[in-house]
């Protein structure tokens, strides 16, 4: 019938339509594969399930391995996770000293001493109104009724008006109370300063000057006294010659990441310049307790033992200038180099540069301190058993050294110079017993101290750990060949090696 379609034709038309639709879908999928080639295997497998099931049936449910067949990571492998960046350093803390470059401000410092707070400010040039302004601010964070004579303060003021813009009161390196001007108001707080202990390891090859060699290795001058304490009485610092080598472990106190002082010298290895000489290792024991170390707290005597747990001990007398060369010894029958007469040398001369620190050889009381004439600036100290020590030719005295002052062993009393009758810088050191001169170097009394048996296991454990750290310090090999001869220097005040035609010093006998 016209207008009617047979069932066969209807089925044919339906088949053609579905075929066309399938063709379009295939073209779409193919285009998607061409644009995303990395997805092709997965799509191909979906299009032909029969072809892939038999091959991958055993791997069903397994995780995808991103490693290629040859063992190398594929392009799809996840990259290694980078370590987190180190934490940023803490922000720097404002200090009054940072205002020194401001031309509109005047900075001044002071020490409290034995006076009220307001009088100390007045002596520093702070006006009365500004002084009360500072007191009101600091009283909120610190009790100004109980002050120490050693406390210090730092002030920054406007030059034009005298107005205080910043103030610091310091009772210790970590106890700092600060007031700053904020919109016309002094606001005070205690600074939160970061204090830490850090162990440092250093190698030192000694040149002609030990002190300079230690500085070249990055060590502060304070280490000289620590090193002298550790090596005494094994080695005199004055006897450490060019070519000697040192390895040191020291613990530093740091404040705001800046060196404050050494908390301890933990271990030292000393190797003489002779190739056949065995190294000497010494260990501090007991080691410091980090939990008990406080910034700038009083230092206590340190004990250093060798690998056998032994410590040679001297008496209470110490060398007043640790790194100085002994240029002339005690000699009651010395022939004077220029006068050619018998003139006793009643002490020991230590040759050292001007300004080298001089320390008390033993505890005692200052008997005199001043200009003595031929002996120049001199300090005399009375000790027990009728002993009096004398220190001559000083360039200057240490602060606080006056008659009647009690001093301890190794306390700073002055600095090397050439005042009085002297033609070169040195220290003339003499000892009297009941008014009669004796040889100062004869006062050393020797003995041996050992680690107590109850602490031997602890000492051995500490030694093993310190040995491991010392071994890790890279050290230059000893110099090849013979060392250059040291220049000959005439001994001051005569002596066996003095050159009569060119004496370095010309002293008169001590008073």
Image (cartoon, rainbow, N blue to C red):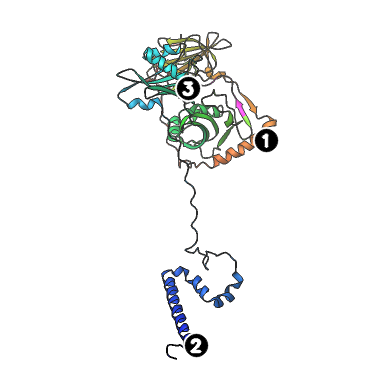
The residue at which mark 1 appears reads as 457
Q: Secondary structure at mark 3?
A: loop
Q: Are marks 3 and 2 in contact (CB under 8 Å)?
A: no
Q: Is residue 172 magenta?
A: no
Report the label total. 3
Of tags 3 and 1, which is closer to the observer? 1
The image quarter containing residue 470 is: top right
Q: Which region of the structure is painted magenta? A: 311-325
93 vs 74: above or below? above
Q: Is residue 313 magenta?
A: yes
Q: Which disc number belongs to residue 401?
A: none
Q: Are marks 3 and 1 in contact (CB under 8 Å)?
A: no
- Graded by Cα atoms within 10 Å as few (under 14), some (14 to 19) or many (20 or more), the crowding at tag 3 reads many
Q: Toward the viewer: 291 or 465?
A: 291
Image location of residue 463, percent across then percent down:
61, 37
Q: Main secondary structure of the magenta part?
A: loop
The image quarter containing residue 50 is: bottom right
């Amino acid at each position: 019938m016209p207008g009617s379609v047979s069932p066969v034709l209807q089925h044919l038309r339906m088949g053609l339509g579905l075929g066309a639709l399938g063709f379009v879908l295939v073209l779409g999928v193919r285009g998607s594969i061409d644009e995303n080639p990395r997805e092709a295997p997965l799509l191909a497998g979906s299009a032909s399930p029969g072809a892939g099931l038999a091959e991958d049936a055993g791997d069903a449910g397994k995780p995808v391995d991103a490693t290629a067949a040859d063992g190398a990571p594929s392009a799809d492998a996840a990259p290694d996770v980078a370590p987190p960046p180190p934490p940023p350093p803490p922000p720097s803390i404002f200090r009054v000293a940072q205002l020194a470059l401001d031309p509109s401000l005047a900075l001044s410092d002071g020490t409290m001493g034995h006076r009220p707070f307001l009088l100390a400010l007045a002596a520093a040039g702070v006006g009365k109104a500004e002084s009360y302004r500072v007191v009101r601010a600091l009283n909120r964070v610190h009790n100004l009724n109980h002050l120490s004579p050693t406390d210090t303060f730092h002030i920054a003021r406007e030059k034009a008006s005298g107005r205080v813009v910043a103030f610091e009161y310091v009772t210790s390196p970590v106890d700092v109370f600060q007031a700053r001007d904020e919109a016309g108001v002094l606001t005070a707080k205690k600074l939160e300063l970061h204090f830490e202990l850090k162990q440092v390891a250093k190698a030192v090859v000694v040149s002609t000057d030990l002190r300079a060699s230690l500085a070249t290795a990055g060590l502060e001058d304070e280490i000289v006294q620590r090193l002298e304490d550790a090596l005494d009485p094994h080695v005199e610092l004055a006897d450490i010659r060019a070519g000697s080598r040192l390895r040191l472990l020291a613990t530093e106190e740091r404040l705001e990441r800046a060196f404050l002082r050494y908390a301890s010298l933990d271990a030292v290895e000393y190797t003489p310049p002779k190739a056949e000489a065995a190294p000497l290792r010494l260990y501090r024991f007991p080691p410091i307790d980090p939990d008990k170390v406080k910034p700038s707290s009083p230092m206590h005597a340190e004990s250093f033992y060798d690998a056998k747990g032994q410590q040679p001990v001297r008496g209470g007398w110490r060398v007043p200038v640790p790194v100085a060369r002994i240029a002339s010894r005690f000699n009651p029958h010395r022939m004077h180099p220029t006068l050619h007469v018998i003139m006793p040398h009643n002490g020991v001369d230590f040759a050292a540069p001007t300004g080298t620190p001089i320390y008390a050889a033993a505890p005692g009381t200052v008997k005199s301190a001043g200009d003595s004439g031929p002996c120049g600036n001199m300090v005399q100290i009375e000790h027990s058993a009728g002993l009096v020590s004398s220190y001559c030719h000083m360039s200057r005295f240490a602060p606080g050294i006056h008659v009647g002052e009690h001093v301890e062993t190794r306390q700073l009393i002055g600095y090397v110079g050439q005042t009085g009758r002297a033609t070169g810088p040195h220290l003339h050191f003499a000892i009297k017993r009941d008014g009669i001169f004796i040889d100062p170097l004869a006062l050393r009394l020797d003995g041996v101290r050992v680690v107590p048996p109850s602490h031997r296991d602890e000492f051995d454990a500490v030694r093993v750990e310190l040995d491991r750290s010392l071994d890790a310090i890279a050290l230059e090999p000893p110099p090849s060949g013979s060392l250059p001869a040291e220049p000959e220097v005439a001994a001051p005040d005569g002596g066996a090696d003095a050159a009569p035609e060119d004496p370095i010093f010309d002293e008169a006998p001590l008073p």
